[in-house]
């Protein structure tokens, strides 16, 4: 590593430079148009898959890049800078559905799903949030009933990223009654492919500045799954959910910094072009100080994101 820890390292630069070139040529010019149309960019997702962007931390044995978190966040930040919607797709796919499989999946499940997810052939959707549960993950109501030969899931999930375009779904549901005073017990996770009978898509969300990212309601109506769809240990998915969310927050932080960097660059450019009283408005302290403050806050956020990623790579607490 170079002595400047917060800058791209020599081994990271070729990948980051290739990505930046691609983003400037293929993504940036049409980002505003895609947001206005609210259409998911399937072609760009396929191209990013070819670059390995959907398998950032997936081990190479499963077709991923096997990158450390500190490299992954630099990639997510750059995609977010180019297009917030596409950045959200990359961040959520890598940290949520893929992340849960990496933490709790059996060898059979990893071998079945991760190669296609890493290649971008199957995007992942991770179902936790419900109308009455989200940050309070233990309050979820979606049920998973054990039946002969498998499980039957019923309920709904809200605000699910990639909800209508995913190729694989990870759904968290209550499989067992919770002991009194311990609502986090009895939650299980399940993984299954798109097209499974009983899975429906409800309302799609219209999100300011993120309209070409797919976010939708999922409807589970007697969704039948085989025994081997259980992801991890029965009744103990809550603990994995917390770890998935912790990792996901690093990705969302990187995405946010990327979006913020693009906004600051736009504002600074405008402040240099717009003239009043014979000079650019950026020369007035009332404007210049605001830009300087925003730049300082953005830099602090980025350094904190890199620190969290480095702690994760070191196996230390980063929450």
Image (cartoon, helix red, strand yellow):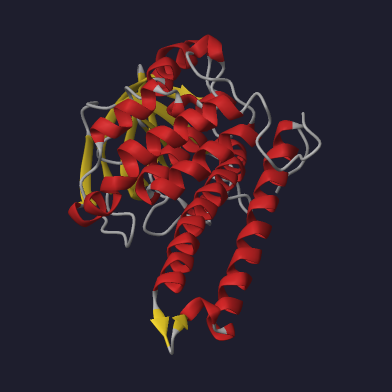
**From the viewer's perspective, is 214 left or right of 5?**
left
Q: What is the quadrant of residue 224 in the picture?
A: top left
**Which residue is located at x 48 percent, y 67 percent?**
268
Towards the viewer: 221 or 275: 275
**Pick the front one: 78 or 207:** 78
In percent of width and height, residue 148 lies at 35, 19
Can you give x and y, in whole percent of width and height, for residue 151 in the image?
36, 26
Taking the spot 40% from the left edge, 26% from the top edge, the residue there is 191
Q: Please report the residue visible at 45 percent of the width from the left and 68 percent of the height from the top.
A: 267
Question: In the image, is residue 247 above or below residue 274?
Answer: above
Evaluate whether residue 233 shows in this view: no
**Above or below 111: residue 26:** below
Q: Residue 219: tell me if it is visible.
A: yes
Q: Position of residue 295 (x, y in %)?
A: 60, 64
Q: Residue at x 76, y 42 (%)?
A: 317
> Residue 272: x, y in percent?
46, 71
264 left or right, relative to 27: right
In the picture as drawn, the residue positioned furthest to the front comes out as 278
The answer to whether 209 is drawn above or below residue 277 in the figure is above
Quadrant in which the N terminus is drawn? top right
Residue nearest the observer in this picture, 309 or 201: 309
In terms of image quadrants, where is residue 68? top right
Number of dots carrying numbers: 0
Q: 261 or 165, which is in the foreground?
A: 261
Q: Which residue is at the far bottom?
A: 277
Q: Residue furthest left?
A: 37
């Amino acid at each position: 590593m170079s002595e400047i820890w917060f800058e791209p390292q020599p081994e990271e630069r070729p990948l980051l430079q290739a990505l930046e070139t691609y983003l400037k040529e293929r993504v940036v010019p049409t980002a505003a148009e895609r947001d206005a149309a609210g259409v998911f960019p399937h072609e760009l997702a396929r191209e990013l898959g070819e670059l390995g962007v959907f398998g950032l931390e997936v081990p190479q044995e499963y077709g991923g890049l096997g990158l450390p978190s500190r490299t992954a966040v630099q990639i997510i930040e750059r995609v977010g800078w180019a297009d917030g919607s596409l950045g959200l797709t990359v961040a959520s796919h890598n940290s949520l559905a893929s992340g849960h499989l990496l933490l709790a999946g059996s060898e059979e499940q990893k071998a079945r799903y991760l190669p296609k997810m890493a290649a971008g052939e199957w995007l992942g959707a991770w179902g936790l949030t419900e109308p009455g549960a989200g940050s309070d993950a233990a309050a979820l109501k979606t049920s998973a009933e054990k039946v002969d030969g498998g499980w039957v899931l019923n309920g709904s999930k809200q605000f699910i990223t990639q909800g209508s375009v995913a190729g694989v779904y990870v759904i968290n549901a209550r499989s067992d009654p919770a002991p009194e005073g311990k609502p986090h017990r009895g939650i299980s996770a399940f993984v299954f492919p798109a097209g499974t009978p009983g899975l429906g898509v409800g309302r799609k969300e219209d999100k300011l500045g993120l309209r070409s990212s797919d976010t939708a309601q999922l409807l589970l109506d007697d969704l039948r799954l085989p025994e081997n769809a259980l992801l991890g240990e029965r009744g103990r998915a809550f603990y994995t959910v917390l770890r998935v969310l912790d990792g996901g927050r690093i990705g969302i932080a990187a995405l946010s910094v990327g979006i913020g960097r693009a906004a600051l660059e736009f504002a600074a450019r405008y402040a240099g072009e717009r003239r009043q009283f014979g000079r650019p408005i950026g020369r007035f302290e009332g404007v210049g100080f605001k830009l300087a403050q925003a730049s300082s806050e953005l830099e602090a956020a980025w350094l904190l994101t890199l620190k969290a990623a480095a702690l994760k790579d070191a196996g230390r607490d980063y929450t």
